[in-house]
Image (spheres, rainbow, N blue to C red):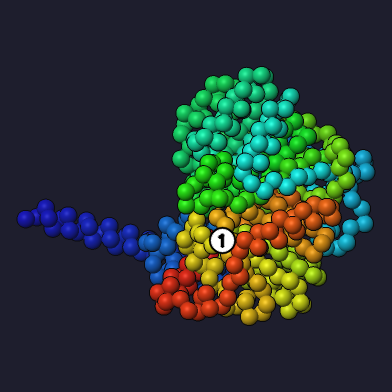
Amino acid sequence: MIAPMVDTDVSYTIIAIVFPLVELLGIAAAVHAVMYARTSQGAIAWAISLITFPWVALVLYAIFGRNKFHGYVLLRSAKNSDIHHYIEKIQTEAADRGLVRENLPLSKVALSRLAEMPTTRYNKTRLLIDGRETFRRIFEGIESAQRYILVQFFIVKDDAIGRELQSKLIQKAQEKVRVYFLYDEIGSHKLPQSYLRDMQIAGVTTSAFHSTKGKANRFQLNFRNHRKIVVVDGKTAYIGGHNVGDEYLGQHPKFAPWRDTHVSVEGPAVQAIQFCFVEDWYWATKSIPELTWELNKAADGQEDALVIASGPADRLETCGLMFVQAINAANERIWIASPYFVPDLQTISALKLAALRGVDVRILLPEKPDHRTVHLASFTYYQSTLPLGIKLYRYTAGFMHQKVFLVDSCCAAVGTANLDNRSFRLNFEITLLNYDPAFVKAVDTMLTDDFSRSRPVSVEDYTQRSFFFKLAARSAGLLAPIL
């Protein structure tokens, strides 16, 4: 009879120690949230949750609470790091060779400073507006490689298009072309080790991005490397919305046809894209590939372009500020295509002010959701945007996944960034801004066609829904900071 009493006493002792300890940890985490949360609303929400429900909130805060990728921040802030001098090399050589566009208007100067890269001249770009054309061009580029190939995708699947990519990379590696393959381990969590092993045996150097590398990042599953980059010999690059999977070629029964946009790039802007890959590769492997860093004019290239790489290691919130600056710069129109519409307060405010200025504000979203929670959250913005003249459209001819925006008749952008908090603050993204009138016109034509395949949204699409739908939408909206 004595033993159970001893066990009970021990249990009470453990409880007496553990419960206050967890509460103290919750209070400490709440203080951390107050000091470092992205917004005051977020700080309040985290602080209340951590103090009131520390057993649950501590786990969630460990995964979702931070907004800076600290290891990457330290790597980037080291001015004497192995990679920092490449930025200076690009900036200096571009200036010395007359490749920098001078006398930019202030709106473009702000974007260039935000990118920490020059707006360069003599580029040549091509819109790629479906999966088959995109991968046909990428594979042609890979086949033409003489020295090296850099490949980076958020999602890579071991399906028909994934195996075709693998085959072409293996073939080039066997031809003694240096091939580097980087993937996000969360986005590509279903990619089998055999897929990577076959490439490694052939001589392809592969690596996960390692978003959880380092003690401080061990539980940080919230960061993603969302970039899609292919660079061939430092001369041609490809970026945009397509990942590597058969659905991106329109072969998914639910989402077909798949609507997406990529862009091929030649000229000095390629080096900025290449640097973006190298910085990610250096974080992942602590090594730097032997590459060509010479800035070359594209044959027949006359386009001004700027590459903006953004992510949770930036000093500023680069991606969100890029969108805000683009919206604020619009005098006639701002058209945005994004599969997700969960913007923050400053972006919504910029859109409202643009509409009040009389700017033609259009946002193209998919009719079919691929992420139900994000789709529901987008409905919560109907009542605050549509009455001001902001036009929302739902793309009905399949699933729309492109990330594009158009400002007046002077700027068009194609990249990987969505109109949501995740792209603004948690994902590593890359966007190409092009100021060439012909390219802008091509994007105009492309988006005009997309709008013709869409239906305009009305406030009644939300207000006439059931109470339970509205409750679900509002609940999803509360998760906006991490969607």
Give the image location of residue 210, x and y in percent. Answer: 55, 41
Depth check, front residue: 41 or 399: 399
Eyeballing the image, is 479 above or below 210? below
Number of callouts: 1
| Residue receiving disc 1 | 396
Eyeballing the image, is 314 above or below 198? below
Q: Is residue 255 visible?
A: yes
Residue at the extreme top of the image, as rendered: 175
Which residue corresponds to the image point at 55% horizontal and 46% vertical from the top-left? 250
Quarter of image, res 236: top right
- Disc 1 is placed on an element classified as loop
Amino acid type, callout 1: Thr
Which quadrant of the figure contains the N terminus? bottom left
Which residue corresponds to the image point at 77% horizontal and 77% vertical from the top-left? 357
Which residue corresponds to the image point at 40% horizontal and 74% vertical from the top-left? 468
Residue at the extreme left of the image, as rendered: 1
Eyeballing the image, is 181 above or below 388? above
Quarter of image, res 168: top right
Q: Along the horizontal axis of the image, is 303 left or right of 443?
A: right
Depth check, front residue: 159 or 169: 159
Give the image location of residue 337, x and y in percent. Answer: 65, 60
Q: Is residue 33 visible?
A: no
Give the image location of residue 376, x and y in percent. Answer: 49, 66
Eyeballing the image, is 165 above or below 70? above
Q: Along the horizontal axis of the image, is 21 left or right of 307?
A: left
Task: Count residues near mark 1 (Cα–Cα under 10 Å), then give few for <14, some for 14-19, many for 20+.
Answer: some
Which residue corresponds to the image point at 47% horizontal and 42% vertical from the top-left? 189
Give the image location of residue 452, x and y in percent. Answer: 65, 63
